[in-house]
Image: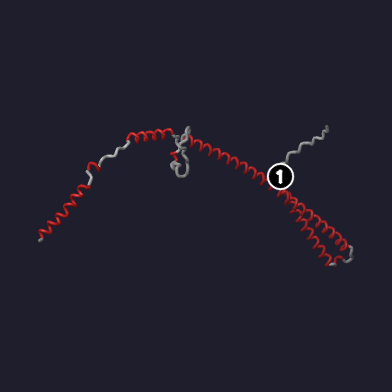
Amino acid sequence: MKIAHWSLGVLLVMPMGIAAGQAQPPAQEAQAPVPVATDSLAAAAKAAREARKDQPKPARVWNDDTIPKSNGAISVVGQTPADDSANAAGATGDAANAAAGADASAGAGAGAAAGAGNRNALETSIQNAKDKLATIKVDLDLLQRTYTLDSQMYYIKPDYASDTEGATKLKDEQDQIASKQQEMDEQQKKIDDMEAELSKLPAASTPPAAPPANNNSN
């Protein structure tokens, strides 16, 4: 019974295998090469190369990404690093000379301004001292006049020797006159010293005289 079932299965399978074998196309027909136009592709590639040769090269744009980072990557035609160093040294020397000249001019101008300022200040001090001396002389003159009058009034008294109050007053006036005289002498000496110092300073520069006006009438 089992043999009969097995035989029946074989018979059923065989027709399916035969049909599958007939349905597959021959291997040679499936792998048949497809013709390629190699000549056309080669001609197109050659034409593309020729077209690229004829096109102008685009101008290079320099920016932060494309500029070389090394100092020696950029060179200037006709100028060598030695020339750059010489030019830089010359420019530095010129700048130093110009700065030195400017400093000298500024120093001279500052010195002249300081000298003029000192002279003006000293002249002002001298004038103030002279004004004070004039006041001292006026005070001394008043003291002397007062003492002269008081002494006359004192000595015309018959008993002036017993007038102790009058004598004391005259003594005080004499002391004031002596003190004022000393003050005047000190003030005069101060003026003399300042004038001697002023004579040592350079003379103040005077502005150039204006040209005479042309009054000729046509």
Front-most of residues 21 and 111: 21
Q: Can you give x and y, in whole percent of width and height, for residue 48 in the image?
A: 39, 35
Residue 194 position, x and y percent, is 71, 49
Q: Residues within 10 Å of mark 1 (few under 14, many from 20)?
A: few
Residue 176: image location, x then y, percent? 79, 60
What amino acid is at disc 1?
Ser
Q: Is residue 167 left or right of residue 202?
A: right
Q: Mark 1 sits on what residue? A: 199
Q: Quadrant of residue 155?
A: bottom right
For the residue pair 214 and 171, the one nearer the viewer reads as 214
Which residue is rendered at x = 51% and y = 36% of the image?
Answer: 87
Q: On the rendered image, what quadrant is the C terminus found in?
A: top right
Q: Secondary structure at mark 1?
A: helix
What residue is shown at x 75% (from left), y 56% (from top)? 183
Q: Is residue 66 left or right of residue 157?
A: left
Q: Is residue 90 above or below residue 136?
A: above
Camera-side residue: 209 or 135? Answer: 209
Above-or-below relation of 182 to 78: below
Question: Between 190 and 93, which is closer to the camera in this rendering?
Answer: 93
- Quadrant for the N terminus, please: bottom left
Residue located at (80% from left, 35% from top): 214
**Labels in figure, total:** 1
> What residue appears at the point 89 percent right and 63 percent down from the top-left corner?
156
Query: How are the residues colored?
Result: secondary structure
